Image: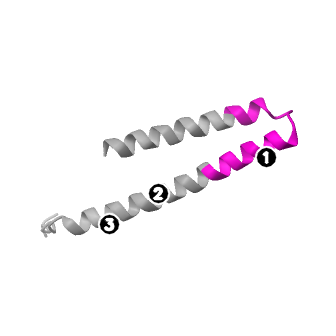
Amino acid sequence: HSTQQQTNKVITSTSHLIKQLSDIISGSSRQERLRVTRLKTELSDSVQRYGDLQKKIAERSRALLPPVPKDKKK
């Protein structure tokens, strides 16, 4: 859980930094803008893979836990 929280913070921080970088180089060369675009794409792909992995971990964790009895009064 702690690792997930730290990773989420890193993702948020990195996203903000890439946005700042994008703003800084807005008037720069085409090559630099393409590099930032590639960084954005790579971050997005990594975040997607991380999300998929989190889902798999959650599914496996639920499978290992004993079933919770349902209270019919609730």
Residue 2, given in percent of the width and then of the height, sits at 32, 41
Q: Is residue 50 left or right of residue 29?
A: left
Q: Residues within 10 Å of mark 2 (few under 14, many from 20)?
A: few
Q: CA distance from mark 1 to mark 3?
A: 38 Å
Q: Residues within 10 Å of mark 1 (few under 14, many from 20)?
A: few
Disc 3: which residue: 59
Instruction: State the residue at coordinates (52%, 42%).
Output: 11
- Chief SS of the magenta region: helix
Does 23 sit above or below residue 3? above
Disc 1: which residue: 34
Disc 2: which residue: 51
The quadrant of the rendering that contains the C terminus is: bottom left
Residue 33, given in percent of the width and then of the height, sits at 80, 42
In the image, which residues are magenta? 20-42
Q: Amino acid at mark 1?
A: Leu
Q: Of label 2 and label 3, which has the lower sequence position? A: 2
Instruction: State the residue at coordinates (76%, 29%).
Output: 24
Q: Is residue 32 left or right of residue 1?
A: right
